[in-house]
Amino acid sequence: MYDSAKRLEMPPFPVDRFIDAVHQVVAANADWVPPYGSGATLYIRPYMFASSPVIGVKPADEYQFRIFVTPVGPYFKGGAKPIVVKISDFDRAAPRGTGHIKAGLNYAMSLHAIVTAHAEGFAENIYLDPATRTKIEETGGANIIFVDKDGNLIVPKSDSILPSITRRSIVYVAEKYLGLKVTEREVLLSEVPDFKECGLCGTAAVISPVGKINDHGKEIAFSSGMEKMGPVIQKLYDTLTGIQMGSIEAPAGWIHKVE
């Protein structure tokens, strides 16, 4: 959020005040925190917007920082079933644009594309790089990860990809907890059929397994299948959620206690 604000010419909210604000909001809404072990969670959404009474294309003189929270149920009810996604004909972000920041404009442009994908029977869109349309970027609301035939984690790299905390956490868990080799690099669409597993990672789902990718009628099916998560992605999911739930010791600084 700090980096996004700078890119949008908004004054970044100080880190210490941000942490304190989250603490205060969670404490004030303690009665709405779902019971431990229920699989539900308290979703926290900080946001900023311009509020000065000016019409014009320029940075505002006044901004408001707010946080809202809401309890949400388990993302996977009855287990995580692999989804089918499609290669989109739309572009998610322009080269050297704002694809790497968290901004409402990035989600607004994805609405028509996701409605179209749902109407065609797909769960999500996979966007390619807008310059060459040969490289994997991300989906409308999540980063993408792959597992190669040797069990190594492959993470697409691009200046247009949002550097999400979930993706960074998964990379850390893969290297430090599971001892996996992790490679962050450009990933060509043409090499995706050689991968064994695929997942979409984000705040709510942590990792959503992908069973198939439809590329304009050509189906790319992962050997992990359509019944359950692949073994490597399952280990990543179990380890990260174990850290979040407190059953696995967290790295220093990952957990903030609200008394």
Image (cartoon, helix red, strand yellow):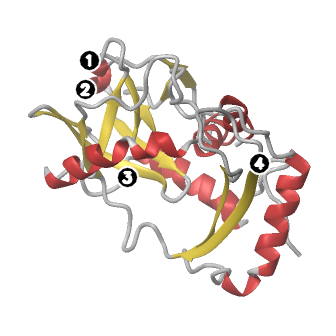
Query: Residue 210: x, y in percent?
Result: 32, 46
Q: Secondary structure at mark 1?
A: helix
Q: Is residue 234 left or right of residue 184?
A: left
In the image, residue 134 sits, relative to residue 19, either above or below, namely above
Quarter of the picture holding the N terminus: top right
**Who comes first in sequence, dot 4 or dot 2?**
4
Gap between marks 4 and 2 measured at Cα: 50 Å
- For label 3, the crowd category at 10 Å Cα-Cα, with few meaning under 14, some 14 to 19 and many 20 or more, is many
Residue depicted at 72% across the width and 61% down the height: 66
Query: Residue 248: x, y in percent?
Result: 71, 59
Q: Is residue 236 left or right of residue 27?
A: left
* Residue, disc 1: 190
Q: Secondary structure at mark 3?
A: loop
- For label 2, the crowd category at 10 Å Cα-Cα, with few meaning under 14, some 14 to 19 and many 20 or more, is some
* Residue, disc 4: 62
Image marks 1 and 2: residues in contact by CB distance under 8 Å: yes
Which circle, 1 or 4, is nearer the viewer? 4
Find residue 138 and report its image quarter. top left
**Who comes first in sequence, dot 3 or dot 1?**
1
Q: Relative to the observer, which residue lies in front, 173 or 86?
A: 86
Q: Is residue 142 visible?
A: no
The label number, if any, that marks residue 193 in the structure image: 2
Q: Amino acid at mark 2?
A: Pro
* Residue, disc 3: 229
Gap between marks 1 and 4 measured at Cα: 47 Å
Gap between marks 3 and 1 measured at Cα: 23 Å
Q: Amino acid at mark 4?
A: Glu
Q: Is residue 10 left or right of residue 160?
A: right
**Who comes first in sequence, dot 4 or dot 3?**
4
In the image, residue 147 sits, relative to residue 52, either above or below, namely above
Q: Is residue 158 left or right of residue 248?
A: left
